[in-house]
Amino acid sequence: MRRDIETAVRLEAGQSRVVDVFGVAEDVQRRFIDENVALEDIAAAVARLATQSGCALELDRGELSEV
């Protein structure tokens, strides 16, 4: 899974210098659904690798709250 996360971050970083942390994490989680790893744990790894690559992080999960 670690290698898949690294590849996903590299691909995202190649398209934009801003990495959608939870978007990438959700994609990875779907590919490894049988391993039952928490989305937040995958997102932490994505964020760490993206930061090490010099990318900005997008942390919005797309959830809107009603006012």
Image (tube, rainbow, N blue to C red):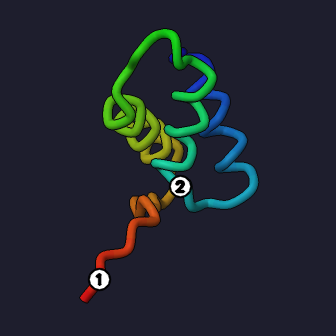
| Count of marks placed on residues | 2
What residue lies at 30% left-to-right and 76% top-to-bottom? 65
Residue type (three-letter) at the residue carrying disc 1: Glu
- Most extreme residue toward the front is 66
- In the displayed structure image, the side of residue 2 where residue 47 appears, left or right: left
SS under mark 1? loop
- Residue on which the image places disc 1: 66
**CA separation in Å, label 1 and label 2:** 23 Å
Nearer the N terminus, badge 1 or badge 2? 2
In the depicted structure, whether residue 23 falls above or below residue 6: below
- Residue 14 in the image, given as x and y percentages of width and height: 73, 50
- In the depicted view, which residue is nearer to us: 54 or 48? 48
Contact, CB < 8 Å: mark 1 with mark 2? no
- Most extreme residue toward the bottom is 67
- Residue 10 in the image, given as x and y percentages of width and height: 66, 38
In the depicted structure, whether residue 58 falls above or below residue 9: below
> Hey, which quadrant is residue 63 in on the image?
bottom left
Residue 20: mark in rendering: 2
- In the depicted view, which residue is nearer to us: 8 or 10? 8
Give the label, 1 or 2, closer to the camera: 1
What residue lies at 63% left-to-right and 22% top-to-bottom? 31
- In the depicted view, which residue is nearer to us: 32 or 42? 32
SS under mark 2? strand
Task: Please tell me how crowded label 2 is: few (under 14), some (14-19), or many (20+) other residues with Cα within 10 Å.
Answer: many
- Residue 64 in the image, given as x and y percentages of width and height: 37, 74
